[in-house]
């Protein structure tokens, strides 16, 4: 069965897209730790990030780098944090999170509540800086 992220790539499930190319896709996390929390994924579905072949892994990091730069341009923050967890969705991904303190990257902290229109506006802003 396809992962929820493969369904997002195939547009079977909607997402707030930031950017994509032939091999990678970036979109806003639906349950963000902080404003601009973005997931970057390879289009080829592999569960664990360190099971990616080295070329795909390096490409994922390069794509995430570009997304992080767009986030920095869009969101006032101390820096962009990057995390790999993968306990919820078995499709390799990195979390890029604009942070001001360590609690912004703590996945057990309270999540940010955002409305649909806010997600749409934010995705558009980040995307325009990509
Ligand atoms: P992890 O697998 O790294 O533990 O966490 C998966 C992340 O994916 C979580 O931060 C969660 O909020 C996010 N997520 C899960 N399902 C969806 C979804 O359908 N859409 C989006 N945009 N994010 C999702």
Image (cartoon, helix red, strand yellow):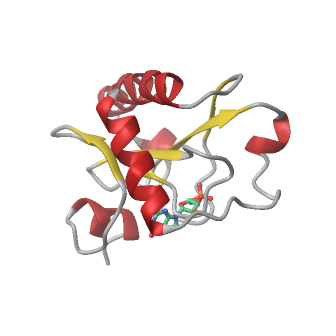
Front residue of 125/50: it is 125
In the image, farthest residue toward the left: 22
On screen, 15 above or below 19?
A: below
Q: Quadrant of the N terminus?
A: bottom left
Q: Position of residue 50 (x, y in %)?
A: 50, 39
Q: Is residue 98 left or right of residue 49?
A: right
Residue 16 vs 98, above or below: the answer is: below
Q: Is 82 on the left or on the right of 124, as rendered?
A: right
Can you name the residue that lies furthest to the bottom here? 1
Residue drawn at (28%, 40%) of the image: 19
Give the residue displayed 48% in from the left and 43% down from the top. 49
Relative side of 11 to 13, left or right: left
Asked whether, in this view, residue 5 is left or right of residue 38, the answer is left
Q: Identify which residue, 52 or 96, lies in the foreground.
A: 96
Q: How many marks?
A: 0
Determine the image quadrant of residue 56: top left
Q: Position of residue 73 (x, y in %)?
A: 48, 22
- Residue 21 at x, y = what percent? 19, 37
| Residue at image point 25% right, 59% down | 9
Q: Quadrant of residue 98?
A: top right
- Which quadrant of the rendered structure holds the C terminus? top left
Residue at left offset 75%, top offset 54%: 107
């Amino acid at each position: 069965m396809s992962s929820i992220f493969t369904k997002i790539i195939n547009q079977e499930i909607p997402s707030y897209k930031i950017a994509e190319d032939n091999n990678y896709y970036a979109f806003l996390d639906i349950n963000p730790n902080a404003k601009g929390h973005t997931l970057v994924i390879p289009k080829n579905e592999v569960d664990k990030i360190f099971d990616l072949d080295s070329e795909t892994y390096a490409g994922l990091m390069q794509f995430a780098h570009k997304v992080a730069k767009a986030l920095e341009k869009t969101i006032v923050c101390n820096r962009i944090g990057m995390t790999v967890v993968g306990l919820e969705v078995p499709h390799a991904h990195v979390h890029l999170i604009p942070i001001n303190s360590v609690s912004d990257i703590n996945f057990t902290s309270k999540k940010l509540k955002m409305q649909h229109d806010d997600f749409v506006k934010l995705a558009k802003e980040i995307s325009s800086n990509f």
